[in-house]
Image: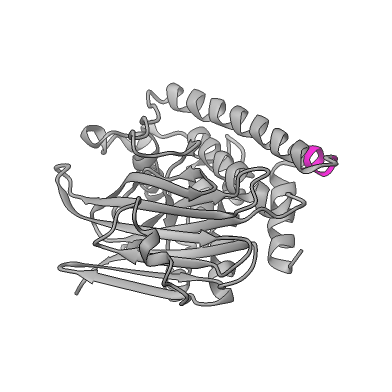
Amino acid sequence: MNSDLVHLKALFSKAYPAEAAALSRCKSEEELYQLREIFLSKAKAALNSALVQDGLSLPALKKGIDSENSQGSQVLLEPLLSKLTNASGDKVKTYVQTALSNFNNVADLGDNDGALKLSFTLLGGFSASIGLEMGRQVATQLLRSTAMSFSTTFIAASAVSSAVIVAAATFVVFSVVIPLVYFILKPAQCVMLLINNTSKIISLESTHNFHGKTDTVTPLIAGATKYEDDDGDITRANFSGVFNSLKRSGALIGVETGYNFNIIDREEQIIDSFSLGVSNPLNGNNKQAVSFNRTAENIDGELTSSLSSTAKSERSDYEITMSMNSTSGGQSYYVATISKVK
């Protein structure tokens, strides 16, 4: 196991000692799969319970989305934001794992540490001047894509509890981190981080699995938001979504998944659409694809000719860029960014 995964495993063990001990006792891949499903089921129940306490609920996935789990978008601030958007090669893997580590940090807080400490960790610990009210507002934004419909996007900051944030972070950790650090026969796995560098909402319209299964998706990714901190400085908060696809247990072929997204304004009008594709075949080259002209169902046409570790597509007012860590290896990491053309 490389040093990055060792660090991620250590964070997991600190945040979830009982679960880590149980996973370490597993003697087969099947036991690991079964135990992860139990943890995910409990985490989903805890998240739903926390949401109910706040008068919220998880939205139903659209009919075109074939996924076992959904979760909320993650806050990104500088310098991690720039590191992710500019990452290439091994840095893609490093910074995606850093983003995943932030979920571990949130989950390790517990329910009673208060909004200040919670917000500090949510934002990656990169700004010492994050104030209490800003933390509450950022928590509200984070919850927009987890629990809010478009018609009730803006709610009172005090309505968001730390229990909801901790439960949401726990759910992400169980779904994405456990396969990375505990599965013995590392399954073909594609971990993608989609960064929303626009002021619009990014909505997942559909998924299509040519091979493997979509394990975790982020149905809505909030638009970038600016806040004034306690010192009067303006801070920009961007949001990202985690997407995780895995090889099916016992399958001889790895993962190939297409995602179709809509760019939506505050009035719920679709401005544009784009598609992303990821592939980790186990035997062969890992691939990626971005397009404004394809759908989740036919993005594989772009994947078959894609051997580059970077990809880009542009149309009218928007552009998509995408980078992956390597064209080889059983676990591949991707960073995609949707931006407004200047």
- Answer whether residue 226 is visible to the viewer in this image: no
- Answer whether residue 9 is visible to the viewer in this image: yes
Label total for image: 0
Seen from the viewer's position, the closer of residues 143 and 326 is: 326
Which residue range is magenta in the image?
20-25
Judge whether 102 appears above or below 20 on screen. Answer: below
Judge whether 216 appears above or below 48 on screen. Answer: below
Seen from the viewer's position, the closer of residues 152 and 176 is: 176
Query: Is residue 23 located in the magenta-colored stretch of the structure?
Result: yes
Q: Which residue is rendered at x = 64% and y = 44% of the image? A: 108
Q: Looking at the figure, which quarter contains the C terminus?
A: bottom left
Q: Which residue is rendered at x = 34% and y = 38% of the image? A: 64
Which secondary structure is most common in the magenta stretch?
A: helix
Residue 237 in the image: state x and y as whole percent: 36, 59
Residue 51 in the image: state x and y as whole percent: 44, 27
Q: Which residue is rendered at x = 64% and y = 47% of the image? A: 251
Seen from the viewer's position, the closer of residues 73 and 251 is: 251
Judge whether 92 appears above or below 153 on screen. Answer: below
Residue 80 in the image: state x and y as whole percent: 48, 68
Whether residue 241 sits left or right of residue 167 in the image: it is left
Q: What sort of colour scheme is used for the picture? A: one colour
Whether residue 278 sits left or right of residue 27 in the image: it is left
Q: Which residue is rendered at x = 54% and y = 77% of the image? A: 89
Q: Quadrant of residue 144?
A: top left
Residue 327 in the image: state x and y as whole percent: 56, 73
Q: Looking at the figure, which quarter contains the N terminus?
A: bottom right
Seen from the viewer's position, the closer of residues 241 and 246 is: 246
Whether residue 172 sits left or right of residue 194 in the image: it is right
Query: Is residue 213 located in the magenta-colored stretch of the structure?
Result: no
